[in-house]
Image (tube, grey):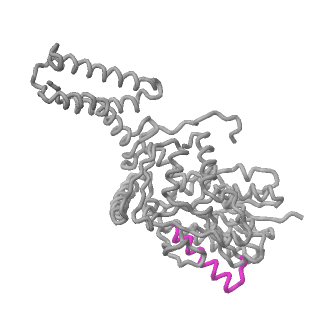
Amino acid sequence: MAKLALVTGACGFCGGYMVNLLKQEGWDVIATDLKRDEHRDQYLEEGALHPLYYQGAVDKKGVKFIPANLTKKESLEPLFEYIYDAVFHTASLYDYFAPWDILYKVNVEGLKNLLDVAMKKGVKRFIHWSTCGVFAEPKGKAITEDHPFDPPNDYCKSKAEQEKILQKLYKENGFPVTIVRPGPMYGLGQHYGVQHVFHTLEKYGIVPNIVWYPKKHTLMYPSVYVTDMVRAALFVAEREECIGESYNVLSDCITQVELMTFLAKTLGLREIRIPVWWPVYLIFCRIAVAFARRQDKQARAMGTRPKQELPMVEYIAHNHWFSNQKIKDLGFKFKFQDPRSGIFRHIGDCRERGWL
Amino acid sequence: MNIPVFDAPLLLLLGIVWGYIYAKKLVESHPDSHFFFRHILLLIFFVNIILSATGAIQPWGMGGNFAVAVNPWIGIFYVLSYPMWFWFGNEIFFLLWGKNSQEGGLTWSLTIKDTTKPFKPAWKSSELE
């Protein structure tokens, strides 16, 4: 008999890929997300990002779609008329521009609602999508799963809150949760986050490649191809030893200098290398953040969004260096271990569609 | 040797103005126009300075007000730098405002409203979802 999975956020970017993978692997799938109209209305009402709504995966044969809204607990009840072998909770408001109260309502209270209903009915495994962004800055080595939290923005803060709830639930009730922390994700259909980096460079028409001196300050770049991400989620869902654990899921980090050189070649843009002394770079970052803060205010007053959101600009002084050794030690093999192989493919897909 | 002192800044300015015309208006409909305009323009400047240096005409036919007498080697060096001034003007524009109507250059980040055009698919595929 086929195993049964619930995928939340199934009409989102990662959720759609999760549904497809589960179907390929012979699982039965109940998919849930907001209804298309509700999705549009809610996002417009709350002034949050209006992400694309992919119905392709849930319209497939063998996938049952039950619309639900995380912020309305009663709408979640029909989902748990089934006993699931695994719940893949990909649903989340991923929006750096959204105000804290909306993020809290959807990501934190929404999770609480889902857990309330799920715990009443019982689930065998609960795979939760967090983010590598919950961590504090690394100190001289790649961040492992036990590194302390210090989320730099509201979105990451909401993810850290989610993790605290789940870890408490695991410790007190033995709730069978596994947390996966993706690095910035990309792949066909992704329009927010990593895509902003590529899009911005294309709009610049050049690739400014900052080379930091002294070299010990060189910043790292984390990322994961979406298919690797969903494979990793399924991988941990099928292993008992992963219960109560958390895993960083990302390709091997490369330096941002390497990334920019690669992007210049792949996007066909001119690379301009800018050697910078680290203290001077920090001053530049402060100016950039102050400017982004001003644009953030202006955009809110105009009822629109800035091209580069404040938290994204704030990231430019952070070192995003994460270790994926824990999941690799379990035996998981990344298809795109070097992110350049995945990024190359992704850029080709985007070029084909006119997204880059 | 008499050289027109304003040729270099004029070429720089023309480089910026032509950068705008080419990048935002002509690059898609007339992609070779940059090559022809650049060479014709430089040819005009070279003809002018050769004729004025030989005394056949006043620089730009405007009398000696804009001409300065310099050492012939400095004059030759100045004349040979003409393509660089025009190229430099082009590059300033392309860097700050982009090389085509889809690009916005480095100033793209400074505005909230995006006035650049969206990208077009780079190739046709029959296998798109």
Name above or below for residue A58 compared with residue B78: below
Say left or right for A307 vs A145.
Answer: left
Kindly give the residue lying farthest to the top in the view shown.
B56
Residue under the image location 60 percent in, 70 percent down: A323
Count of all numbered marks drawn on residues in the image: 0
Asked if A40 appears above or below B75 in the picture, the reply is below
Who's the residue at 64% across and 63% down the image? A91
- For this view, does A245 lie left or right of residue A103? right
Q: Is residue B67 above or below residue B98?
A: above
- The magenta segment is A155-176
Q: Position of residue A106 (x, y in %)?
A: 57, 66
- Look at the image and tell me in which quarter the N terminus of chain A lies: bottom right
Residue B66 rendering spot, x and y as whole percentages: 13, 26
Whether residue B87 appears in this view of the structure is yes
Q: A248 or A328: which is nearer to us?
A: A328
Is A172 colored magenta in this rendering? yes
Quarter of the picture holding the C terminus of chain A: top right
Q: Position of residue B56 (x, y in %)?
A: 16, 13
Q: Could you tell whether A76 is left or right of B112 in the image?
A: right
Identify the image quadrant of residue A285. bottom left
Q: Nearer the viewer, residue A315 or A332?
A: A332
For image coordinates 42% across by 36% down, the residue present is B99
Q: Main secondary structure of the magenta part?
A: helix
Residue at figure coordinates x 64%, y 33% from the top left: B124
Query: Please, is residue A322 above or below residue A275 in the view?
Result: below
Q: Quadrant of residue A317?
A: bottom left
Q: Does the magenta run of residues contain A188? A: no
The answer to whether any part of residue A94 appears in the image is no
Q: Position of residue A213 (x, y in %)?
A: 39, 63
The image quadrant of residue A144 is bottom right
User: Left or right: A27 with respect to A131?
Assistant: right
